[in-house]
Amino acid sequence: MAQNTYSICVVGSGSFDLFLLVNHFPVEGETLQANDSFIKNGGKGANQAVAAAKLGAKTIFAGQFGQDKYGDGLVEEMSQSGVDMSKVRRLANVQTGQAIITLNKKGENSIIIVGGANTHYDHLNVLPQEFKDAIQSSRIILLQKEIPLEISKLAAIYAKQHNKLVMLDCGGRDEDIPEELLQNIDFISPNQSELKRVMNINSSDHGEITIDEIRQQLLSKYPNLTVVLKEGSKGSAVITKTDYLHVDSASLIKPDILNTYKIVDTTGAGDCFTAAFCVEFDKLFPQNGVQYEDALEKYKKCLLFANCSAFVCITVMGAMPSMPKLESVQQLLSKVQ
């Protein structure tokens, strides 16, 4: 098999994000005065591609933008961040995707997404040739849920046909994941609420999902799947059919570190985490299918790198602009290890 040109191919979304800074989130029927507003580039796929590139991975992006100034801005910023944009499709008479983000004083956000070009596929049963080319040239294929899941499913199937590794970030639209997509991925990265949707568990009737439940209800059906669980301020975990590893975030929230890093905006943190995990995995597990004797130790390094990357991310306003450079993450890692 030919050597991969890229470490990571992100097949996904890109958007321009309108941020509204508010004291609190509006309730039904409330007219709320925003304190300020600004526009930044974003979209889960674009964020992840920029994060991967800035963290040192050779990265290519496959997605769809409109032929408008917002699409031009995405191409420019992502290219400047080191992402290969040669396989992006520019659609006529279709607007680039949008996100309207309300951000409160705690750095918490609420998001409304307008699909635009991200969801405008003429044929949901045909994978664009540009996407195939990008997948063929890459080792790890990173997917999310802001483009049609039918396209993500085709991308995953095509990737596995060409012996690629596939990671699905569960962030995005609230939709059931097709079984054929789950059958063709190697890693899935949800938070607790997203994991409940994957496992068809009613969130209101169920507390935190246990490791046993994950193994009995998910990994028994997909035994080769690895769950990379995002647990917010608690840290993160890797769960397989036989192994479990949790990395605590307590070392990141010590007073001396919080005096240096101020949390201002959580937008994009999950995107950054998943991309960073893939970047570090590519470095530490260079061969597919090999049984690494120190696999858990390597996974621990992947989680710690991803946790630190996400933490640096939330100290900067915006989504794409907050994706950290490798040097910034290494600086934080030196303080927590």
Image (tube, rainbow, N blue to C red):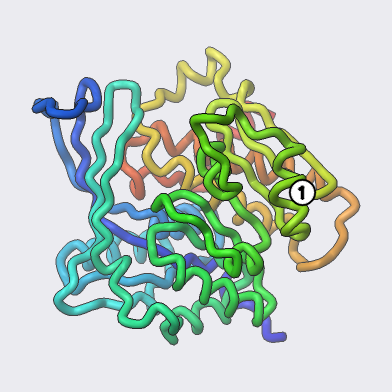
Question: In the picture shown, does residue 178 fall above or below 203?
Answer: below
Q: Quadrant of residue 248?
A: top right
- The residue pinned by badge 1 equals 240
Q: What element carries label 1?
A: loop
* Dot 1 alpha-carbon crowd within 10 angstroms: few under 14, some 14 to 19, many 20 or more: some
Residue 24 in the image, given as x and y percentages of width and height: 24, 22
Looking at the picture, tell me which residue is in the foreground, 87 or 150. Answer: 150
Of residues 308 and 92, the one nearer the viewer is: 92
**Can residue 193 be seen here?**
yes
Asked if residue 235 lies left or right of residue 78, the reply is right
126 or 78, which is in the foreground?
Answer: 126
Residue occupying image coordinates x 31% and y 66%: 118
Q: Residue at x 77, y 67 (%)?
A: 287
188 on left or right of 133: right
Q: Can residue 329 be seen in this view?
A: no
* Residue 214 percent across, percent down from the top left: 70, 43
34 up-or-down from 166: above or below: above
Residue for point 48% across, 19% down? 258
Q: Where is residue 156 in the image (x, y as percent from the top left)?
A: 57, 71
Q: Is residue 317 left or right of residue 249?
A: left
User: What residue sits 38% from the left and 72% below the top?
Assistant: 85
In the image, residue 102 above or below residue 134: above
Q: What residue type is labelled 1?
A: Thr
Splitting the image into 4 quarters, where does residue 1 fall? bottom right
| Quadrant housing the C terminus | top right
In the image, residue 224 lies at what x, y percent?
A: 76, 60
* Residue 215 in the figure: left or right of residue 303: right
